[in-house]
Image (cartoon, rainbow, N blue to C red):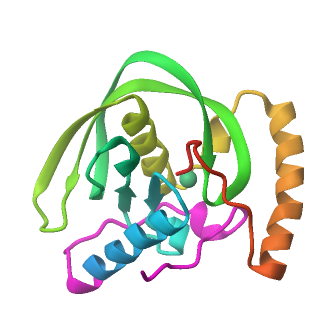
């Protein structure tokens, strides 16, 4: 296992628009391997490259707890959002300990490249759809907290988060939230 260090709320890389990948090189494949390892080690269901400090358009999704094969998408683009709006709590490895409701479309069609550079087109619903939408947001410098409607609660959550981040910087340790959406 070769985990990469995470980027946290407040770091510029999480607010940048990530660069497309022009060619799937050995170096890119290695980063993707490390992203899978990091995602698993941190008990996430998804991870975007900016979350490990790399401003490139790469995401991985790991819903293996639902018997889904983990996969990566390079240069993912959401082509269609449809179905009813659904509201669920989300969390983020880069925003540790904050879980808040976000409303998103239930269904999407997404296109991207796989590890071999082949075009993939995927229809996703519910948790997988939410995961992909959350990760693609990361590539555009957006975090789930940007979509939270309860701004008052968010402000107090962010205040608590600052303390938690200071603790992480100091000790390198943090509690690992289990079972909830963390992407
Ligand atoms: Zn996230």
Dominant SS in magenta: loop
Quadrant in the rendering for residue 21: bottom left
Q: Position of residue 92 (x, y in %)?
A: 61, 52
Instruction: From the viewer's perspective, tell me whether residue 22 is left or right of residue 143.
Output: left
Q: Nearer the viewer, residue 62 or 103?
A: 62
Q: Position of residue 42 (x, y in %)?
A: 55, 64
User: Residue at (56%, 49%) from the top-left corner?
Assistant: 182
Instruction: Determine whether 25 is above or below 161 in the image.
Output: below
User: Residue at (73%, 64%) from the top-left corner?
Assistant: 10
User: Residue at (20%, 74%) from the top-left corner?
Assistant: 24
Quadrant in the rendering for residue 8: bottom right
Q: Nearer the viewer, residue 2 or 138?
A: 2
Magenta stretch: includes residue 79: no
Q: How many marks?
A: 0
Instruction: Determine whether 38 is above or below 93 in the image.
Output: below
Instruction: From the viewer's perspective, tell me whether residue 172 is left or right of residue 54.
Output: right
Q: Position of residue 132 (x, y in %)?
A: 39, 44
Q: Position of residue 117 (x, y in %)?
A: 13, 65
User: Residue at (42%, 72%) from the top-left corner?
Assistant: 37
Q: Which quadrant: the N terminus?
A: bottom left
Instruction: From the viewer's perspective, tell me whether residue 29 is left or right of residue 81.
Output: left
Q: Which contiguous range is marked in magenta?
A: 1-27
Q: Nearer the viewer, residue 28 or 13?
A: 28
Magenta stretch: includes residue 10: yes
């Amino acid at each position: 296992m070769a985990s990469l260090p995470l980027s946290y709320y407040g770091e510029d890389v999480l607010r940048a628009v990530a660069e497309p990948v022009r060619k799937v090189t050995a170096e890119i494949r290695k980063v993707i391997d490390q992203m899978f390892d990091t995602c698993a080690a941190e008990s996430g269901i998804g991870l975007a490259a900016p979350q490990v400090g790399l401003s490139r358009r790469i995401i991985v999704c790991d819903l293996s707890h639902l018997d889904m094969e983990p996969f990566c998408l390079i240069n993912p683009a959401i082509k269609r959002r449809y179905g009813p709006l659904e509201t669920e709590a989300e969390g983020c490895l880069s925003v540790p300990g904050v879980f808040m409701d976000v409303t998103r479309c239930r269904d999407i069609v997404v296109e991207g490249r796989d590890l071999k550079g082949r075009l993939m087109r995927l229809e996703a619903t519910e948790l997988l759809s939410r995961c992909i939408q959350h990760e693609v947001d990361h590539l555009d410098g957006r975090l789930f907290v940007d979509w939270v409607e309860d701004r008052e609660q968010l402000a107090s959550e962010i205040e608590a988060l600052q303390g938690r981040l200071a603790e992480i910087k100091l000790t390198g340790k943090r509690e690992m939230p289990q079972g909830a959406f963390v992407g």
